[in-house]
Image (spheres, rainbow, N blue to C red):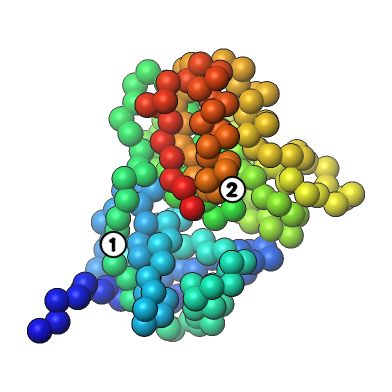
Amino acid sequence: MNTGPKFLTAKTLECKKLGDKFYSFVFETKTPLIYKPGQYISVKVSDTRINCYSIATSGEGNRISLLVNTLPGGPGSKYFENLKVGDEINFLGPFGTFTLKPDSVSKHILFMGTGSGCAPLRNMIDYLLKIEHVQTPISLYLGLRYQANIFWQDYFEKLSQDYPNFKFILAISKPDATWQGKIGHVTDLVKQDFPDASSLTAYLCGKITMIEEAVRILMANGMAREKIYTEKF
């Protein structure tokens, strides 16, 4: 008797290369996928491996999208690099507790991400601005290594124009001479921009080193640990 997990299926509608090794995939599930912004699905990328990917956006009907970084080069990277429009994926979920928390006292909501850690943050931000219509100031700090990695810049810049309470800060840690934006790590920028973090709520997603440093900085600047929510890669 088969007692293994019962996988769901979704059809690949779109594969788009966003920047260097970052790809966007749009899938259509057979029935609407009910989930909370910030949650992830577990995709079967080989006979012996299941990888987790945060849901980046939800579209009309049964559509969802994932942001995938194929730089690691493992089974998941190879699986998604070979995925084509029309292919079906097998997945479980949604899962995860890295979701928006009820909050009525914060004066500013801070999001910090590195690389594909931006995926659940985009979903959360879209929900807050477009569904909840919150007026609280919201800031997204996205850290990438090279200019070739850049993705979604136009989207977030347009979002900041449409929603004056939203601010987008993109930082490149190893830019070339043509880069005219922010340089360095998002942790250093947040440390500089929020010397008093006592009234913030923060959502951090990405590399564990970034998250650990960000938590130290935010707490040193007066933020309560229970107001910091994290998802580590």
Which residue shows up at 60% across the image and 38% down it? 141
Whether label 2 touches label 1, CB < 8 Å: no
| Residue type at tag 2 | Thr
The answer to whether residue 61 is above or below residue 192 is below
Measured from the top left, where is residue 209 in percent x and y? 57, 43
How many residues crowd around disc 1 within 10 Å: few (fewer than 14), some, or many (20 or more)? some
Measured from the top left, where is residue 150 in percent x and y? 68, 55
Which residue shows up at 29% across the image and 67% down it? 92
| Residue type at tag 1 | Gly
Which residue shows up at 46% across the image and 37% down it? 203
| Mark 2–mark 1 distance (CA, rounded to whole Å) | 24 Å
Measured from the top left, where is residue 171 in percent x and y? 70, 42
- State the residue position of label 2: 114
The answer to whether residue 101 is above or below residue 145 is above
The answer to whether residue 99 is above or below residue 117 is above
Query: Count of labels shown?
Result: 2
Residue 135 seen: no
On residue 93, the disc is 1
